[in-house]
Image: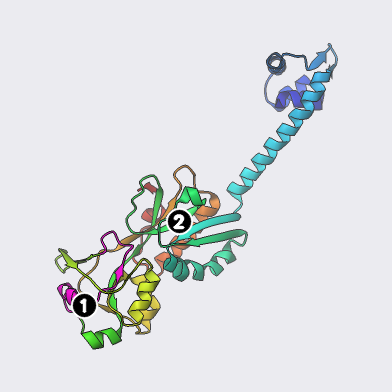
Amino acid sequence: METFARIVETGSFSAVAREMMTTQPAVSKQLQALEKHLGTKLLVRSTRSHSLTEAGRLYYERCRQVLDTLEEARLEVHRAEHEISGLLRVAAPAAFGRLHIVPRLAAFYERYPKIKVELQLDDSFVDLVGAGIDVAFRVGELKDSRLIARRIGTAHRATLASPAYLARYGEPRHPSELAHHQCLVYTGLANINEWIYKDEGNADIVVRIGGNFRSNSSEAIRQAVREGLGISYSTQWIYGDDIRHGRIKPILTQYRPPSLPLNVVFQPARRPSLKVNHFVSFFADAFRQDPDIGEMLTETASKSITKD
């Protein structure tokens, strides 16, 4: 189609051959093949000139429309891949999004003013394909092996309580003492009735816990801790300001709960776009400098993309 259109527009087989870096006979063969495919003559040729048949005129008009549409599509794809702009749909756990994504968006927009972010906050795992999500933040081990994951941080966990609760009920000195306390249960955990710790020798201590309050919202658990309702076993980044201002106190600090990976995940069938890569890199860099989110990742680990 492109060869035929350029023959019409240049009026010369040899000119088209030069454009396409081929020979004049090769151009003629392409036209003949097109005419054979269509079952009609497109050009009436003589030794010095050629003219369009009626079918050729109609076909050229449609060809030009199709070729122009394809060129527009090519330019749009090129802009999408090489310009950092457009709408970015992001999903994250509610507390994490409020505390660690939204406060960093002003700096992100300063660097990438043409990107628009639509942030969906939900403590349950969002279906990336069904919701049209470009990238999602996930805290914890990934279970969906179809997703492409990139590790960008670590969520350290801690055992926490308010000074008022500890003053009233006493501070436990060993995880086994938690059986005698009101433990606030976050139902988003894989096993909601067991809290796991590592002792100084790295051996596991598994504690059966219970209490009179449970919730699927990490922010509700945080507020319950602040109100003195009980003890929480939570990711430390939810309580950063509370800890720094003394509203909540880490306890059992010599016994370490296992840390959780912080990943971003992508749809398996979609290669991350330029805007997604820059968004993820921006937040990965920010998280490496945040003591609430955890350890410094190596440059290699932070840039790797692996199947879960």
Instruction: Name the dominant secondary structure of the magenta segment.
Output: loop
Q: Is residue 305 above or below residue 36?
A: below
Q: Give 6 or 254, whichever is nearer the viewer.
A: 254
Amino acid type, residue under disc 1 in the picture: His
Read off the residue under disc 2.
136
Left or right: where does residue 54 sit relative to residue 166? right
Which residues, given as a range, are shown in magenta? 172-192
- Residue 94 x/y as whole percent: 44, 66
Q: Is residue 172 above or below residue 148?
A: below
Read off the residue under disc 1.
181
Residue 186 appears in the rendering: yes
| Quarter where residue 116 is shown | bottom right
- Residue 132 x/y as whole percent: 52, 50
The residue sitting at 80% across, 24% down in the picture is 58
Q: Give 17 or 45, whichever is nearer the viewer.
A: 45
| Quarter where residue 76 is shown | top right
Amino acid type, residue under disc 2 in the picture: Ala
Q: Residue furthest top?
A: 47
Residue 190 on the magenta span: yes
Under circle 2, the secondary element is strand
- Residue 154 x/y as whole percent: 34, 63
Left or right: where does residue 31 sit relative to residue 245? right
Residue 183 on the magenta span: yes
